[in-house]
Amino acid sequence: MGYENCVFPKESVFLVTGGAGFIGSNLCEAILRMGYKVRCLDDLSTGKQENIDLFAENSNYEFVRGDVKNLQVCMDACGGVDFVLHQAAWGSVPRSIEMPLFYCANNITGTLNMLEAARQNGVKKFVYASSSSVYGDEEHLPKQEGREGNLLSPYAVSKRADEEWAKQYTRHYGLDTYGLRYFNVFGRRQNPDGAYAAVIPKFIKQLLSGEIPTIHGDGKQSRDFTYIENVIEANLKACLAGHEAAGEAFNIAYGGREYLLDVYYRLAEALDVKGENGKAPEPGFGLERAGDIRHSNADIGKARRMLGYEPEWDFERGIKASVEWYVANL
């Protein structure tokens, strides 16, 4: 259960791309805590220096500032590395619709550069972040690998392209690749600011600041919110997976389903935010965002079978931990 019992050779070196970001910095922290060496690659375009200042004095930690769009940067970063955890990408469906060329260069070419660098440097395992967005307009629930619909955004296209390129590198070049389709990850150090911020940290910050959050749409959209600890587990267990699982993509979630309106009221209750009537104030409602899917819920059976993935953190436990972290750190 969990990832604490994941054991690697003593001198193992992990490269975490996008290591200054939300997911990347949590991966760096967990691996360093386990006693292994971590090289963090980030251009700090969306990642934050403060996320990695926590490890600056750790002798097992190395920071490389660089851009995955530059092949030579990727080649240098992969030198002497055993495991690559590739998290470097720009997120946000709405922003990808505004910036399609950048998303192609950053999310697709950047991943291809990392795959090639990993291959040439003899990396043992290449684990990369995909996304539940690859399911597009496929309405069947729960979402199941192999049953994808029409893609709804350039971001979704970029993640699906990453999966196809990774599959080619396993098929033709013998690089063991493992795609992790993240479902609405949340937790400590997730950025609450900006127009493209994820809903949970954004709601928490607004409620703590006395603002009334706005929900895009009617609030009846559902998501399989996945706490960061489950994602760390998936990455580390993928590094230990056998060759028979290589070239595949896996749903990484808890397997639950929460409605946005319910999430808002739970957060208001957890933060003890009340209106004049003594109840949580009504949220605002705005237009639905282009490219967003209506409902999301994951079948995690394939990850259980092939990766040994057994997520321990359900939504309630994750929300409690997240609220405590933001109250202490905002």
Image (cartoon, rainbow, N blue to C red):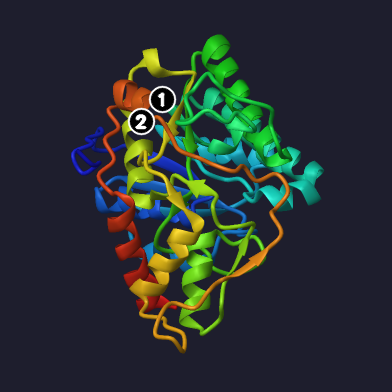
Which residue is denoted by mark 2 in the rendering?
239
Task: Name the one closer to the observer, 109 or 82.
Answer: 109
Secondary structure under the numbered disc 2 in the rendered image: helix
Q: Position of residue 110 (x, y in %)?
A: 66, 38
* Left or right side of 252 for 9: left
Point 38% across, 37% down: residue:
235
Label drawn at residue 151: none
Q: Amino acid at mark 1?
A: Lys
Task: Name the one closer to the observer, 36 or 129.
Answer: 129
Q: Position of residue 128 (x, y in %)?
A: 50, 35
Instruction: Determine if residue 81 is in view.
Output: no
Task: Name the one closer to the observer, 175 or 258.
Answer: 258
Q: On the rendered image, what quadrant is the N terminus found in?
A: top left
Which residue is denoted by mark 1 in the rendering?
124
Point 36% across, 30% down: residue:
239
Q: Position of residue 75 (x, y in %)?
A: 59, 35
Q: Amino acid at mark 2?
A: Cys
Q: Is residue 137 above or below residue 292?
A: above
Task: Characterize the local packing of mark 2: few (<14), some (14-19) or many (20 or more) Cα atoms within 10 angstroms.
Answer: many
Q: Quadrant of residue 211?
A: bottom right
Q: Residue furthest top?
A: 172
Q: Is residue 46 above or below residue 283?
A: above
Task: Characterize the local packing of mark 1: few (<14), some (14-19) or many (20 or more) Cα atoms within 10 angstroms.
Answer: some
Q: On the rendered image, what quadrant is the C terminus found in?
A: bottom left
Secondary structure under the numbered disc 1 in the rendered image: loop
The mark closer to the camera, 2 or 1, is: 2
Q: Do the numbered discs 2 and 1 sit on residues whose CB atoms are within 8 Å? A: yes
Q: Of the two numbered discs 2 and 1 on the same chain, state the one appearing first in sequence.
A: 1
Disc 2 from disc 1: Cα separation: 8 Å
Point 66% across, 27% down: residue:
161
Q: Position of residue 224 (x, y in %)?
A: 44, 44
